[in-house]
Structure formats: C-alpha cells, structure tokens
Amino acid sequence: MHFPRSSGILLHPTSFPSRFGIGDLGGEAYKFIDFLAQSNQQFWQILPLGPTGYGNSPYSCYSAMAGNPLLLSPEKLQDEGLLTDEDFANLPDFSLDKVDYERVIQTKRALLRKACDRFKANISPERQAEFTKFCVAKASWLDDYALFMALHRSFGDTSWYEWEPEIAHFQPEAVQEWREKLSDEIYYRKFLQFEFYRQWSALKQYANDRYIQIIGDIPIYVAHNSADVWAHRDIFTIDEETGAAALMAGVPPDYFSQTGQLWGNPVYKWDKLQENNYQWWVERFQATFEYVDIVRIDHFLGFEAYWQVEMGETTAINGQWVKGPGAEFFQAIKEELGDLPIIAEDLGLVTPAVLALRDKFEFPGMKILHFAFGGDSDNPYLPFNIDRNCVIYTGTHDNNTTVGWFNQIQDHERENAIRYLGCIGEEGIHWALIRLALSSIANLAIIPLQDILGLGEEAQMNRPGIAQGNWDWYYRSGALTDELRDRLKTLTHIYGRKPHRS
C-alpha cells in the first residue's frame, strides 16, 4: 500500500489522562481525536490492545484477539446505568504522571464486577440479544479466552502449564467440566469483551468520522501464558511434558542490548500452520482489523528468518537463525483476505531477503531518525537516503524521547545531528526533529506525543530488555494546548501533509 502524504501521532490509550489511574476509552480519548483532527493529522498509531499480563506489556497479552478491560471507561459504563457516582466516591489519589498498575487493577476490577452484576440483573431483551449476537460472532476465540481467564483466576493467577494436568492439556472432558463449573466467571469475562467492543467501536467511528485512521499493531509472537498457546498448543513449540516453551523467541545482540532480547514466547510450528493454510493467522488478522484500519506487523523480519533459543537459556546469545514462512505466508493471507493495509516493522538485522519480502507485497517500512546520525552519509535512516513508500518516525515506543535521546547520545552523534539540522534554535531538539520528519519525502510521518510535548527520558514508554517499570507514562489533562495544536498544524501545512478532501 502507498499512503498519501500525511502525518499522525503515536500514543497508546493507557497514556490518556484519567482519574481512574490509567488512560481509557472515555472523554480524554475523544479530546485527543479532536486534537488530531484540529491539527490536521490523519493517523493515530497505537500499540496492541490486548489484555496485558506480567509486566503490563501490550506485547505480552493473555490473548491475541481480546481487548484490554483496563481500557474500559467507568464513566461510559455509568452512562449505560451500570455504575453510579457513589461507586466513584472513594477513588485512590492516583499519580498524575505514572500508571500504578497494582492499584489500578484493584480499583477497576471492583468497578467492573459491579457493572457486570448490574448488567446481568437488569439486562433488557434488546441488550441481551446484542450480547448474545456478540458472543456467537466472536466464539472462535472468545469461548477459549473467557474460559482461560476464568481458570487463570481459579488457579490463583498461575500460568496454564501449572494447572491440573487434564485442563492444562485442554482435554475435552475437562474443558466441558470447567466451563460449567466457572460459568459465572466466564460470563463476566465475556461481558468485559462485549463492553470493550462497544466502547472501542464507538471511539473508532468517532475517529473515522473525522478522517482519522487508526494504525494498530500485531506482534509476531504471542505470550506463552495466553489463551492462544493453551488452546492451540499444536501450532507452538511446547514441551509436551512440562508445558514450557521448548524453543523461545528473541533477537540476538543489537542496538538495544548486548545480550540480545530473550522474549520467552514459544516460536511457531510453521509446518503445522501451513497444513491448514495459516487459518489461525487469518483469524488473527480478521480480529485485529475489526479494531483498526491499518496494521503494523511488529518484528516483520521474523517472517523471513527468526531467532530461536532452546529451553533453559537465560539470554538470547546462544540462539540460531531459522528460515521463516516468507512470501508463501503473505500470499496465503492475501488470497483469504485480499490486499491488506500493512506496515512492516523492518528494524533490526535487516537482510536483502527481508527487504525483498517487504517490497514484493509493497509494504511500507519504517525509518527512525534517532538512528540516523551515528554513522556516515550512507546511513539508511538519513532522510535523503529513504524511499517515499515508508513511515518515518522521530522515535518509537522502544526509543527514548527525542529530548532524552539527544541528552544521552555520544558527542560525535550529537554533533552530526546538529550539523545535519543546521541549527536547533529556541524551539528545541524535539521540534527540530519533528520538522525533519515532516519535511522528509516519506509518505507518512508519525510523531510520538512525548516529542510534541517536549518531554525527557522520564516519559519513555518502554526500555527494551528491562521487564519492569515500563508502559506506565501518561500525560496530564490540559497538556494538549491550543499552542501545540496550532504549531503542529502549521508545520503539517508547510510540509504538504494536510488532508486533501473534496
């Protein structure tokens, strides 16, 4: 696909301001979309929307197809008559700058259970029909996910491979027995997904009505402790005796880590997936495109070749490259679903074979300006070396903020950046790099909101290779000022990225 010349903002919904301690799909989300529209942006990029587990990472979710209940807006539930002002009377004093996930989970869990109880007790025939229709339509993944989460709670939030053997191995008799035993909890989990679908669909429609398209994210791998692996273990490299990941995913030593990154996700049995024409992946794409307009495939290079590490290793150093499914996979997806709007996250150890796979299907790649100044004039991230069919970023969720990056890079890299930019001026390095991204020939420029706000390293979303203390930044209410809106709009117009609509 080829984007029109355009721009947008990268911001995950957890980063919206909220009196409930974490961003949600309520009023601040709608204000952000208004900010996008009023500053003439055309895209909103988010991270994966799934229910997060240990470490709170959206790249390690309990399901590849479900939504994160923590994103549900209690105020929207109040509008439905499922919560009251009295339910909000004793909210904790949450931090204004960081998500305290433990307190948020305790607070929201209590509110969501109240909402479910009222929904169940007072449901109208019309709403019952809507709920039933949703459950039937999503049954291919919802039934397994709801049971998985009910079991997860029943077994003390332990991983599925620590459960009783019969249910850990997804034996049909045990599955049926537990479905009946945990029916109330299963109903609750389905209710949460129903409400997530309703709230997100309304928000997406609001964005689309204002000509804002949403770029979502599909991580190549899914979490080991997930409904997907538990219910579909035949397509993952799982040790049959212990349930451990027999072969783990990761990347070798790179820019981010001297020991590489050992993600721990089980790699796929691509030969098994091939046998039924990659149907699980087809369903995954279908589910994701219900929530977003465009998909960024995280770790795209893993489809050409992936790094696998044997069970028992504690770092990613002792791994090996294995050939991936390549063009056959994307051709199968195309035959099932047609030409999909996909962005390839082609960062890391990119080989000519990865570039050939990307270009065969005309997927735009990614260019990161933070990577542009560490070498010579042949650096592929320098704006004069990039192709039009790409997405250019100042940085991504895995990078420091631009202010934080500029303060920490080596002197020669900082001097290269200053020489390239000519001058930085009073507007600061963040606006200088935003200008550079917007002025480039890349069809699409995406700017993290932290850079528009001019924030330092304290606002970095993720530090790759560090398991804890990530994904917790959110901005304060009132930060999206008219001045920022007008500055961004002006630059968007100067560099020819404003919308062209009849």
Image: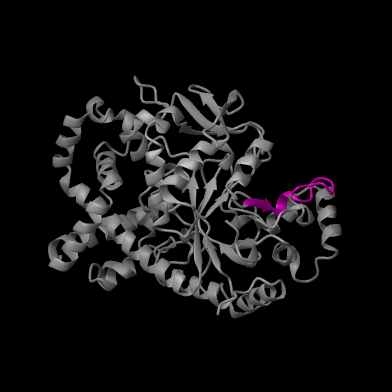
Q: Position of residue 419 (x, y in %)?
A: 86, 58
Q: Residue at x 60, y 23 (%)?
A: 318
Residue that extends furthest to the front in the rendered view of this protein: 335
Position of 79 relative to 440 (above/below): below
Q: Which residues are magenta?
A: 365-380
Q: How is the image coloured?
A: one colour
Residue that extends furthest to the top in the rendered view of this protein: 241
Camera-side residue: 440 or 112?
440
Q: Residue at x 56, y 28 (%)?
A: 323
Would residue 293 be found to the left or right of residue 360 on screen? left
Viewport quadrant of the N terminus: bottom right
Q: Position of residue 8 (x, y in %)?
A: 59, 65
Q: Position of residue 190 (x, y in %)?
A: 25, 52
Q: Position of residue 78 (x, y in %)?
A: 28, 70
Can see residue 124? no
- Asked if residue 434 lies in the magenta stretch, the reply is no
Q: Residue at x 48, y 48 (%)?
A: 218
- Asked if residue 371 lies in the magenta stretch, the reply is yes
Q: Residue at x 52, y 55 (%)?
A: 341
How many numbered discs? 0
Can see residue 86? yes
Camera-side residue: 264 or 478?
264
Would residue 91 be found to the left or right of residue 308 on screen? left
Viewport quadrant of the C terminus: bottom right
Position of 210 relative to 314 (above/below): below
